[in-house]
Image: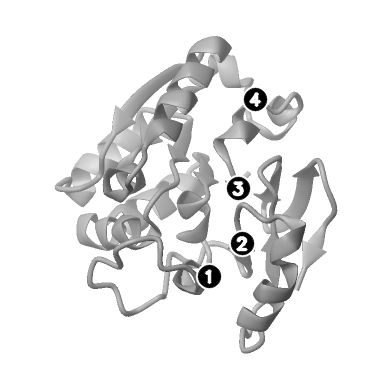
């Protein structure tokens, strides 16, 4: 079964029912933690919070920055784990690294072979057909990226870190989109298993 988890925040890692959506319990899984997107942000304290949460949950993980890695190196690293957890941060920097390293090809093959992909924020955006939603903010250096096309593993877009006061601005920005968009607050995730999407976590299901 192909399983893709697209979350808004690292808070979701402690979801009480996450084991219901994994091939085996999180505590028994080997996790590859991709921190690349956090390398081009002003404040990466959220990475330490994730490490602390991982420590509390007591599961095995290996940290990896995909920048400078080859496709073969990534295939090997992915083959040794059950879950790849792709951290949030600068979506543009992450997408550039994905393209340069061949991570997109390596991880697609791994997912086809049963690896669980777990993205958070930027890590979720790059799984969509496009990262256009990341262009709605000027927070991050775009790292020379002008083509918004992404890995296209799911047929919809995600807007992470959604709060109700954002809705009208998001509706305005999304007017020309040709794809549905799911708005996720920091306690929600979309889980896609064999092409079937399900929203889990607290809050309303908001699709534009």
Res 47 visible:
yes
Q: Which mark is residue 133?
A: 1
Element type where label 4 sits in the image: helix
Q: Write down the residue under mark 3.
A: 8
Residue 64: quadrant of the picture: top left
Badge 3: how crowded within 10 Å, few (<14), some, or many (20+)?
many
Tell me if label 3 and label 4 are in contact, CB under 8 Å. Answer: no
User: Vertical placement of 10 versus 133: above or below?
Assistant: above
Which residue occupies the foreground of this view, 138 or 109?
Answer: 138
Element type where label 3 sits in the image: loop
Element type where label 1 sits in the image: helix
Badge 2: how crowded within 10 Å, few (<14), some, or many (20+)?
many
Q: CA distance from mark 4 to mark 2?
A: 21 Å
Tell me if label 2 and label 1 are in contact, CB under 8 Å. Answer: yes
Give the number of marks: 4
Q: CA distance from mark 3 to mark 2?
A: 8 Å
Q: CA distance from mark 3 to mark 1?
A: 13 Å
Q: Which mark is residue 81?
A: none
Where residue 141 sits: x, y (%)? Answer: 29, 63
Q: CA distance from mark 1 to mark 4?
A: 26 Å
The C terminus - image quarter: bottom right
Badge 4: how crowded within 10 Å, few (<14), some, or many (20+)?
some
Describe residue 42's horizontal placement relative to residue 61 as left or right. left
**Earlier residue among tags 3 and 4:** 3
Residue at the location (26% across, 42% down)?
74
Q: CA distance from mark 3 to mark 4?
A: 13 Å
Q: Write down the residue under mark 2.
A: 159
Tell me if label 3 and label 2 are in contact, CB under 8 Å. Answer: no
The N terminus - image quarter: top right
**Earlier residue among tags 4 and 2:** 4
């Amino acid at each position: 079964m192909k399983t893709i988890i697209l979350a808004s925040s690292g808070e979701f890692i402690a979801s009480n029912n996450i084991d219901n959506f994994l091939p085996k319990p999180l505590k028994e899984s080997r996790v590859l933690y991709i921190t690349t997107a956090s390398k081009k942000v002003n404040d990466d304290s959220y990475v330490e919070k994730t490490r602390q949460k991982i420590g509390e949950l007591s599961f095995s993980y290996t940290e990896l920055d995909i920048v400078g890695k080859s496709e073969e190196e990534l295939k090997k690293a992915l083959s040794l784990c059950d879950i790849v957890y792709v951290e949030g941060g600068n979506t543009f920097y992450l997408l550039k690294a994905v393209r340069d390293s061949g991570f997109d090809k390596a991880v697609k093959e791994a997912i086809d072979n049963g690896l669980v992909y777990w993205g958070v924020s930027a890590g979720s955006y790059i799984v969509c057909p496009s990262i256009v939603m990341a262009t709605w903010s000027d927070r991050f250096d775009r790292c020379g990226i002008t083509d918004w096309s992404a890995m296209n593993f799911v047929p919809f877009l995600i807007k992470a870190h959604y709060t109700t006061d954002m809705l009208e601005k998001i509706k305005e920005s999304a007017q020309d989109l040709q794809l549905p968009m799911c708005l996720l607050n920091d306690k929600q995730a979309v889980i896609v298993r064999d092409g079937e999407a399900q929203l889990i976590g607290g809050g309303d299901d908001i699709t534009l």
